[in-house]
Image (cartoon, grey):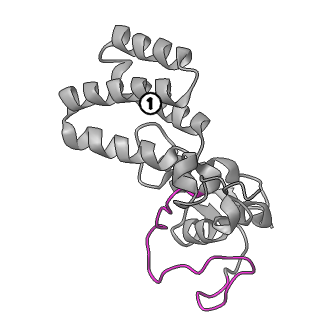
Amino acid sequence: MLLHKTEKARLELSPGVRTLSLRERSLLLLADGKSLSDLQAMYNGIGAQIVDNLMRQGYLTGPAALPAAHEPVVGAVPATAQAPSIQRPEPGESLRSLAGARMYLFDTCERLFARRDPALAQQFRDALRAAKDRVSMLDVGEAMLEEVAMTAGAERAASLRERLEQLLPYTAAEQSGPFELTQPADLA
């Protein structure tokens, strides 16, 4: 069964309108002409819940009859009753990466500095491109967040820092327990 965007969805995807989560918006972008099963399989199974919510809210049209709320869709994550939108899950292991964190910093630079201070934005872009490891990338990110704190306030910088930390992969010490990094003693 193919899904199609409604006029409400087209309005949501227009510039300057942001009422849905990033995952909901990205699924909406891909939805036109895609099959229901393809969209439900997205986001490690959470796609089924997102599609269901978008259809119930009037963003997508497709099958004539939606399954009743008490009938689970195969592979679906159960939806909370009367939730207007899905809860954003914490990034899982698959979403944590240095590349993702780097892209987040580039995006933050563009959104916060490109129009207000193009020279500063270019400095941050160049520094991010030159950062070849985790430490140097985080140094640039910290400098960027300090600038955000001075211009937009400490609360805004703290929220950006928290999101960055959610995107960073765990270090070896964070992944292993306290004894996994130690080597066994030579018994011979």
Q: Residues within 10 Å of mark 1 (few under 14, many from 20)?
A: some
Position of the C terminus by quadrant: bottom right
Q: Does 137 sit left or right of 37 as displayed?
A: left
The spot of residue 123 in percent (x, y) is: 41, 11
Q: Does 95 sit left or right of 81 as displayed?
A: right
Q: Does 37 sit left or right of 93 as displayed?
A: right
Q: Is residue 128 above or below residue 99?
A: above
Q: Quadrant of residue 78?
A: bottom right
Using the image as rendered, state which of residue 74 and residue 173 is in the foreground. 173
Q: Is residue 146 above or below residue 56?
A: above
Q: Quadrant of residue 115?
A: top left
**For the stretch drawn in magenta, what is the main secondary structure?**
loop
The spot of residue 100 in percent (x, y) is: 57, 38
Amino acid marked by disc 1? Leu
Q: From this viewpoint, is residue 45 visible?
A: yes
Q: Badge 1 is on which residue?
A: 138
Q: What are the residue bounds of the magenta stretch?
A: 67-92
The spot of residue 181 in percent (x, y) is: 60, 52
- Please report the residue visible at 71 percent of the width from the left and 67 percent of the height from the top: 62
